[in-house]
Structure formats: structure tokens, C-alpha cells
Amino acid sequence: MEQVEVVVTRTENKTWIVEELKKVSSMAAPMVVVSVSLSLLPTISLMMAGHLGKLPLSGVSVATSFTNATGFAVIFGFCGALDTLCGQAYGAGQYQKFGSYTYCATISLVPICLPISILWIFMDKLLILVGLNPEISRVACKYSIALIPALFGYAIVQSLLRYFQSQSLILPTLISSCAALSFYVPICWGLMFKWGFGYCGGAIAVGLAYWLNAILLTCYIRCSSSCEKTRILCWKDVFSSFSTIWRLAVPSTVMVCLEWWTFELLILLAGLLPNSKLETSVLSICLTTTALHYFLQYGIGAAASTRVSNELGSGNPLAARAVVGVVLSISLTEAVIVSIILFCMRCVFGYAYSNDKEVVEYVKKVTPLLSLSIVMDSLQAVLSGIARGCGRQQIGACINLGAYYFIGTPISVLLCFVAHLRGKGLWIGVVTGSTMQVALLALLTAATNWQKQARIAKDRIFKGQLQQTADGIEL
């Protein structure tokens, strides 16, 4: 009798795993396309700029790094609060709160863009002050100024993406993102090579694509019956949600920015090396590649965040825990395959960004480290998604601070400037920090008390009271 019960239990577990794998895959696959479509916009601009010469490539590389670190990372991180709040509110059936959180986040993000825009306008003076090449700095500043409209569009798009993602409405975001990308590619090429805008044309095209995406998503929300329950606007609830949003948004922003700033710091440090144009060009290629793949994995992490937050909001801690194993398996499998392919193509990979043989040869030398970095970043993306689904951004911020700024960055500086490994040394340090980050996040996830997290989610949504960090640390 006991043997029969064990067999039945194992069969049920296998069936549940298959079903969960289907659910996660049905969300992750289109989310991967959405994430990659959005991240391809600045990537394509960088690749096209590389065919205008070394100076445009270096300038656009620095501008992309600076604007990511000071603008797009802030917006992206801020919206991480919606992964927790919208996901758990939807799981709990609190649809009016769901809509209020989205409206509140959008209203909060627009004024945040204003000081960021002012910083971009005077970007060249700041870069020259820290010792970067004046020519590269001026090109980077012009590109960043042209990118300001894209910042506002990006803020709206990110809020709307979380709105759709948290209720598993992925098809609208998939269609709008693909439409924006299809529109962007010919416009970017025309602006840069045919209509005389040069490298600034890439920034203008990015802005047009983001705003097109935002308009398409807004139209869907206004017209579709599937959004009828969650698009209700109640100003009283919106204003009362500000404190709740900001309590999660601030640590979520810190969590993202601490990691993002580390990678962008590599470009600035590379600009201090003797052959700054070569070093910044090669490291920007590596950074762009890992960022592109990260957003692919972010799609899987977003699915994990949604499934975990929905299950916790619904009061199903065991289901939330089971989701973790499924998404980690998918993530690791994909990362290993991509890493192996990239390593095998290391001799020709550099030609995707530049025709300069010196750049291509340097990229070949750094690619083995790049392959390892892709595996670590993939696991980090999913583990961070799980942390966001639980609302544990404070702990995630502390982990990122320790992994990158107490371990990764010091090692990068020592290997680059003391051991004279140049850009390769910078990347070794970051890979070390990523490895430590993954280890700590994995330990946090493995030790999680899922029943306690379900209780915290219930209190957060129904009572509107966020637990203090000390409560959240109890595993």
C-alpha cells in the first residue's frame, strides 16, 4: 500500500513539474522576445556606430554606459517594486490596488527623468573632469542629449510592461515590442547613414521606438476588455500608494544600480588606460553582449517573479517554492548552451561590432571570460527575479553591495592597474563579483521560509503595511 502511495505521489509530482514548466515557458518565451527587443535598440545603434569609425564607436559606447548607469538603470530598478506589488495584488485578486500601483509608479517616474536629463546635458564636462579623452567625451555628450526623449518613453514603457507581465498578458507586449523594433531598424539606418544625422541618429531612433511602444500599449489598455478590471483609476488609492511604492522602489533601484554601475565603471576605468579607444571599444562590446544576453535571461527571471509573486499573493507557498526549481533549470540550460556557442565562435565574434582587426583580436582573447560571465549573469537574473517576487529587494541590495564593491571592483582595479592585465583584469574582477553574488542569492533562496513569505505578502496587500527589513531577514 505504501509503495502504491509513493508511486502515485511521484507521478503527481512529475505531472505538476511538467505543468509548471509549460506555464513558465509560455510566459518566459515571449518575455525573452520582449526583453531582447527592447535591449536590441541601443545595441543596434552601437553596432552601426562602430562602422562609422573608432571615435563614434568609443563615444557611443561611453554614452551608452553613462546613460544606462545614470538613467535607464534607475528607471528599470524603480519598476522592480511593481514586480512585487502588482504580482502579489493580482494573485490576491486586489485589482483596484493593482491598477493604482501602476499609475503611481508612472507618475513617480516622469519627474525623476528631469534631473537625469540635466545631468546628461552636461555629461561631457563630467567625463573630462574624471580624465576621459575629450574627443570621446564630446561625442558621448551629443549622443546622450539626443537620447533624452528616449528616457521619458522608456519610463512609461517599463511601467506598462510590469502592468501586463504581472497579469500574464504577454501577447500585447510581444506585439508592441516587435513592432517597435521593426520600425526602429530601417529608421536608425536611414538617420545614421542616409539623412545626415550620423551617430546621433541612433539615439533619435531609439526614442521614436520607445514612444511608439508606449503608445501601442496605452491604446491596448484603453480598448481591451482584458484590462477592464485593472485599469480603473482611483486617485485616492493612487496617492495612498506612494509610500508603499517608494519603500520597495528605493531598495529595488539600489539593487539594480549597484550591479549595473559596476559594469559601467569598467568602461570609465578602461578610458584611463593608455590605449583608451581600443580598451573602451572592446569592453563595451563585452558589456553590450552580456547585457543583451542578460535581458534574454531577464525574460525567464520576469516569469519567475510573476509566478512567485502570484502564488504568494494567492497564499500558495508550496507552489511558489516549486516554481524556483523549474525556472533555475531552464535558465542554467540556456546559459550553458549560449556560453559554449560563444566560445566556439570567439575568432569571428568581434566582426559583428567592428571591422578593425585589432579590436577583433582583443575580443577573441576576452571571450572565454565572457562565456563564464554569461553563466553567472544568467543565474543572477533568475535569482534576482525570485527575490523581487518575494519583495526582498533590501536583502538583494546588500548582497550586490558586498559582492561587487567589497570583492569584485577591488579585484578589478588590482588586476588592471597593479598586475597590468588591462581590460582583461577588469573583467576578471567583475566575474569574481558575479560569482559571489550568485552564491549569496542561491543561499538566500535555498533557506527561504515560503510560508512566512506568503504571510508577509498577505499583510502587504490587505493591510498596506510593509514589513521592516528585520522581519524580512528571518528565513
Image: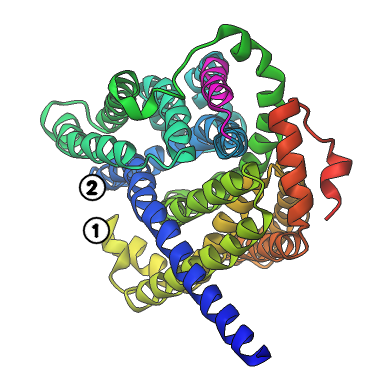
**C-alpha span from label 2 to label 1:** 7 Å
Q: Is residue 417 above or below residue 48?
A: below
* Quadrant of the rendered image containing residue 105: top right
Secondary structure mostly seen in the magenta stretch: helix
Height in image: 437 above or below 61?
Answer: below
The outermost residue toward the top is 235
Q: Which residues are magenta?
A: 93-109
Q: Secondary structure at mark 2?
A: loop
Name the residue at 45% across, 58% down: 24
Along the viewing direction, whichever of 473 and 140 lies nearer the viewer: 473
Residue labelled with disc 2: 51
Instruction: Check disc 1 and give the amino acid type.
Output: Asn
> Which kind of residue does numbered mark 2 sit on?
His
User: Which quadrant of the figure contains the N terminus?
Assistant: bottom right
At label 2, counting other C-alpha atoms closer than 10 Å, the crowd grade (few under 14, some 14-19, many 20 or more) is some
Q: Is 344 on the left-hand or right-hand side of 232? A: left
Q: Is residue 382 above or below residue 254?
A: below
Number of numbered discs present? 2
The image shows residue 173 at horizontal and vertical percentages of 33, 37
Q: Is 107 or 227 nearer to us in this picture?
A: 227
From the top left corner, tell me how far across and down residue 153 is, in percent. 39, 23
Residue annotated with mark 1: 355
Q: Earlier in the sequence, mark 2 or mark 1?
A: 2
Specify the color scheme: rainbow
Q: Position of residue 277 (x, y in %)?
A: 42, 49
Q: Quadrant of residue 251?
A: top right
